[in-house]
Amino acid sequence: MNTFSVAKYNSYPSIATAEALFLQQLSAAGLSLTKFLDQLSPLLLAEAHEGHYAACLIHRHCLLQEGERMVSHGRSTRPSRDISCRIVPERWLGTGEEVEHRFVDAGHPIPLPPSPKFLEKFRDIVERHNIDTIGVCYAPSAAELAPGFTFLESAGVEDRELVVDVVQDAFIPDNAKVYCSAWVPEYGISPLGGESRQEKPAMRCTHACIGCPP
């Protein structure tokens, strides 16, 4: 069973450093962001996995104290000492180690984590290019995030809190530094409406951070 380590979490880089390191690793591998993400699309879109998982940038949101985990509940994400069985992992390293967690409300099914076979295939791709800054997270459902919208994260008012809002892409400020932290593959829209499976899927940013600590 893969457990969570506070020391490991605190060793992850900030989002700005993680982005810079990711771009350096892509450059060293001779890949653009698009070409790298295109290699992950077939795995994320495989029949058994489609719509379940996304690629995410591994970083820490803050420094945790022993006994804490970063837990999202609704719009808020912050450190928690709660040991409820309703708290489950939502982000993982390619090894399966837990990174961050979410609280699942009663009456909602607890989502399945990625299988060992899925993670093995994921590691095959990222390790081939010596990239260790990308992990796996749950993908948002269409009900949670419609096309043309992004989860936008910003600092909250509570201790080490981040608040997530659903924002239309057109309203994200052009002059602000925005870090993308998760990508999901999706097909284009056909002229007749609905998805066009004849088109090559593209990875789009679904989760970003604005004004996050560098």
Image: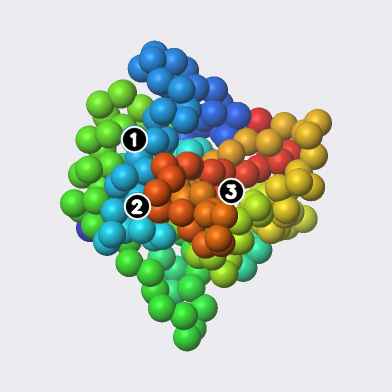
Report how far apart the C-alphas of labels 1 and 2 lie in the structure. 11 Å
* Residue 11, label in figure: none
Amino acid on which the number 1 mark rests in the picture: Gln
Amino acid on which the number 3 mark rests in the picture: His
* Image location of residue 126, percent across then percent down: 31, 32
Disc 1 secondary structure class: helix
Residue 45 in the figure: left or right of residue 32:
left
Upstream in sequence: badge 1 or badge 3: 1
Where's the C terminus, which quadrant?
A: top right
Graded by Cα atoms within 10 Å as few (under 14), some (14 to 19) or many (20 or more), the crowding at tag 2 reads: some
Where's the N terminus, which quadrant?
A: bottom left
- Of residues 183 and 71, the one nearer the viewer is 183
Residue at (36% x, 58% y) in the render: 50
* Residue 39, label in figure: 1
In the displayed image of the protein, which residue is found farthest to the bottom?
Answer: 107
Graded by Cα atoms within 10 Å as few (under 14), some (14 to 19) or many (20 or more), the crowding at tag 3 reads: many
Whether pointer 1 and pointer 2 mark residues with C-beta atoms closer than 8 Å, the reply is: no
2 over 11 or under it: above or below: below
Residue pointed to by mark 3: 207
Residue pointed to by mark 2: 45
Amino acid on which the number 2 mark rests in the picture: Leu
